[in-house]
């Protein structure tokens, strides 16, 4: 159970990082 929880936490962290990166890229790139 603990391993699964740790994996889910890691996945959530990665997803949050991806959201931050995509938001930054959207700000940098010109809207088409």
Image (cartoon, rainbow, N blue to C red):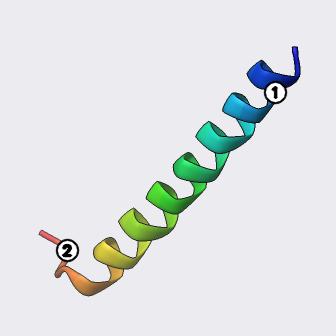
Q: Which residue is mark 1?
A: 5
Q: Quadrant of the N terminus?
A: top right
Where is residue 14 shown, x and y percent of the image? Answer: 54, 50
Residue at image coords 60%, 38% = 11
- Label at residue 31: 2
Residue at image coords 64%, 52% = 13
Q: Assess whether mark 2 and mark 1 are in contact (beta carbons under 8 angstroms).
A: no
* Occupied quadrant, residue 6: top right
- Determine the residue located farthest toward the left in the rendered image: 32
**Of 4 and 30, the residue lying toward us:** 4
Where is residue 15 shown, x and y percent of the image? Answer: 54, 47
Whichever of callouts 1 and 2 sits on the residue coming sooner in the sequence is 1
- Determine the residue located farthest toward the bottom in the rendered image: 28
Q: CA distance from mark 1 to mark 2?
A: 38 Å
- Label at residue 21: none
Report whether 28 appears left or right of 17. Answer: left
Q: Quadrant of the C terminus?
A: bottom left
Residue at image coords 17%, 81% = 30
Where is residue 25 shown, x and y percent of the image? Answer: 30, 74
**Of 26 and 2, the residue lying toward us:** 2
What is the crowding at mark 2: few (fewer than 14 residues within 10 Å), some, or many (at least 20)?
few
Where is residue 27 shown, x and y percent of the image? Answer: 34, 82
- Determine the residue located farthest toward the right in the rendered image: 2
Report whether 4 appears left or right of 1. Answer: left
Report whether 30 appears left or right of 23. Answer: left
Residue at image coords 45%, 56% = 18
* Occupied quadrant, residue 22: bottom left
Secondary structure of residue under mark 1: helix
Is 8 rendered above or below residue 27?
above
Is 15 rendered above or below residue 4?
below
Secondary structure of residue under mark 2: loop
Mark 1 or 2, closer to the camera: 1
């Amino acid at each position: 159970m603990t391993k699964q929880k740790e994996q889910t936490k890691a996945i959530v962290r990665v997803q949050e990082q991806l959201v931050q990166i995509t938001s930054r890229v959207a700000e940098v790139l010109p809207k088409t």
